[in-house]
Amino acid sequence: MITQVVPNKRGGSVKHSFRDVQAKVNALQGAPLETGGPLLGPQKPGKKGMKTLVLDLDETLVHSSFKPHPGRQSDLQVPLLIDKVECKVHVLVRPGTLQFVETLAKNFEVVIFTASLAKYAEPLVAMLDKNRSWCSQILFRDHCTYNEQEETFVKDLSRLGRDLKDVIIIDNSPSSYCQHKENALACRSWFNDVRDRELYEFIPILKKLAKVEDVRPYLSKIGSEATHK
């Protein structure tokens, strides 16, 4: 569990878990989004006709903590206001992330879909995409479907407004794409391994998938081969 220490008004400190902090921000943001329409708007000029690459954020592209990372300097720091106290989220960026997204933005409409809250994720993505060159749209926790039985946030790809034969999701959490396993390219959870090469390895695979008629049989085959290794 990720924790942070926030000064209180009496000069002491209060421990907040990551879930506690996000619950506080949820309360500030109001109820989850209710919409009958597609989650994504029309594809932007230059992206029309491209397949959609849906990317998770935490433990897929970055790892964040409310405490400094031992022995590591943060790559980014995201300010977050909680109970009128400004906190800092310390972010490590997965090796190859920027090359990965910038390269694949030439072949895909790249969408960030995170189960995190907009108050944290939106400024973080703005830092990662400071030239606004690769991220077409961002979806947050409010756009997820909450599974009460499993207590998980599910990313329902059928609500995107894109043909599912043209959608690929990369996420470290299988529960996020449990309704659309045939659209998933599973990845390992990343925390701080500087030797990690997975995003680099995905680039040639995804470039090939950008050209196929239907990504699902290819992704299902990749998933099956990975399972039997």
Image (cartoon, rainbow, N blue to C red):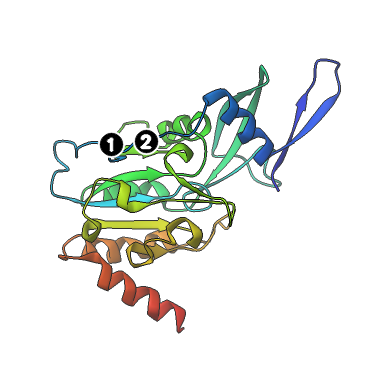
Residue at x 48% of width, y 35% of height: 121
Return the x and y of residue 82 as percentages of the image width and height.
65, 24
Question: In screen coordinates, is 147 left or right of 38?
Answer: right
Gap in angstroms between the C-alphas marked 2 and 1: 6 Å
Disc number at residue 5?
A: none
Residue 151: percent from left, percent from top:
59, 52
Q: State whether residue 13 is above or below residue 214.
A: above
The picture places residue 31, in percent across and down from the top left corner, at 51, 30
Can you identify the residue that label 1 sits on? 133
Q: Is 95 drawn above or below residue 7 in the view shown? A: below
Mark 2 = which residue? 129
Q: Secondary structure at mark 2?
A: loop
Is there any visible trace of residue 174 in the rendered image? yes
- Element marked by disc 1: loop
Residue 42 to residue 207: above or below: above
User: Which residue is more in the foreground, 221 or 41?
Assistant: 41
